[in-house]
Amino acid sequence: MLSVLIAVLFLAVPLALVLAARHWRWARAIGPVVLAYAAGMALGLSGLMPEAAEPMRNTMTEASLALALPLLMFGIDLRAWQHLAGPALKGMALAVAAVTIIAVAMFFSSSGSTELRAQLTGLAIGMYTGGLANLGAVKLALTVPDARYLMFATVDTMVGAVYLLFMLTLAPGFFRKLLPSPAGTTAHSPAPEELAPTGLTLIRGGVALVAAGLCVGLAVVIAPAIPFGSKDVWTILLITTFGLLGGQIRFLRENPAASALGMYLIYVFSFAVAAGLNLAGLAGVEMQVVAFVVIVTFGALFLHALLCRAFKVDADSFMITSVAAIMSPAFVPMVVRALGNEAVLMSGIAAGLLGFAIGNYLAIGVALSLAGLGG
């Protein structure tokens, strides 16, 4: 009975936060992800979570993220990338390269155990090439402790706010002097439509969940049969792969419920992870996490700018791909408005989805390679 109540709690609280963000301005300004983390941490630190609830919390953490990955991947059309504008594609490739270079440099220049540094490197590459879903996937694949993951996510929220403020205010003028001017600003690309609440029908949601469950089930069955590597790593990579393949099926890719359900499950994951925080775990968090997030975020930003200057990528393509990588494609329209150049909107979003698709493979691969150096 306790397990059922915990499961209901972990599903109901994020749903309430989503509804709050739709109806109250203050909640919308904070955002469901931050609210989910805050609510989870409040629950964990309150001491109200009984020790017997821990197995169900772990189950909810793993299941929510596992289902969220394919649901979010279903929206990616791999064939559409052949039409991606050249500057945006080049800018995104350089953004991924910059994040990877800075994160690996931090691995070699930081102190601490090889395991700690490899985990932070993987988290940074996953987060700053794809986004929150990649961060959660890397956490599970590399078995990152909850307290370390929460500290990374919390610091990223604060640093990300500073980064975004800079990109919306001072960055356009600064980088348009440093980098070539954009080719043109007259083309118009409509913003992607947001799913209205009435679009989340039971039938569409059921189809999306069944398809996502099939992706997860296949990954869970196949992963143990692979004779090398970690089962957890292969499970995450296979779920990612099956989700991408599912996105090539039209009725899954155009299902409006998939991405909305995927984001809701990310909120469930955030709440469940945060609920595992306790005072003992908080006291043991390495402050090295703070330095890692700050240096990778801004180090990658300026290395990316230098690479774009060297490879003659224009200023606007640089800025939208930087935001798409470091923040997520969801923030691209905001920056496009600040730039006054709607021609780069869809290219920026498509480039961000490309980073999201490769983020798990790159982050986990690099982290495991670096972890092997300590063996």
Image (cartoon, rainbow, N blue to C red):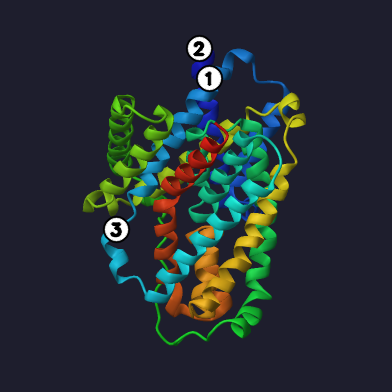
Q: Which mark is residue 5?
A: 1
Residue 334 appears left or right of 29: left
Nearer to us: label 3 or label 2: 3
Residue 345, above or below 275? below
Q: Are marks 3 and 2 in contact (CB under 8 Å)?
A: no
Q: Looking at the rendered structure, which numbered label has been put on residue 99?
A: none
Which of 320 and 304 lies nearest the eye of the viewer? 304
Q: Are marks 1 and 2 in contact (CB under 8 Å)?
A: yes
What is the spatial separation of the Cα atoms under label 1 and label 3, in whole angstroms?
40 Å
Residue 244: percent from the left, percent from the top?
A: 31, 48
Query: Residue at 51% of width from left, 48% of height from top?
Result: 126
Q: Quadrant of residue 298?
A: bottom right
How many numbered badges does the structure rendering display? 3
- Residue 36 rendering spot, x and y as whole percentages: 60, 40
In the rendered view, tell whether residue 258 sits above or below residue 312: above
Three-letter code for the amino acid on which mark 3 is drawn: Leu
Crowding around mark 3 (Cα neighbors within 10 Å: few <14, some 14 to 19, many 20+) is some
Q: Which sits earlier in the primary sequence, circle 3 or circle 2?
A: 2
SS class of the residue under badge 1?
helix
Q: Amino acid at mark 2?
A: Met
* Quadrant placement of the C terminus: top right
CA gap, disc 3 and disc 2: 44 Å
Marks 1 and 3, the one that precedes in the sequence: 1
Q: Secondary structure at mark 3?
A: helix
Q: Which residue is mark 3?
A: 78
Residue tagged 2:
1
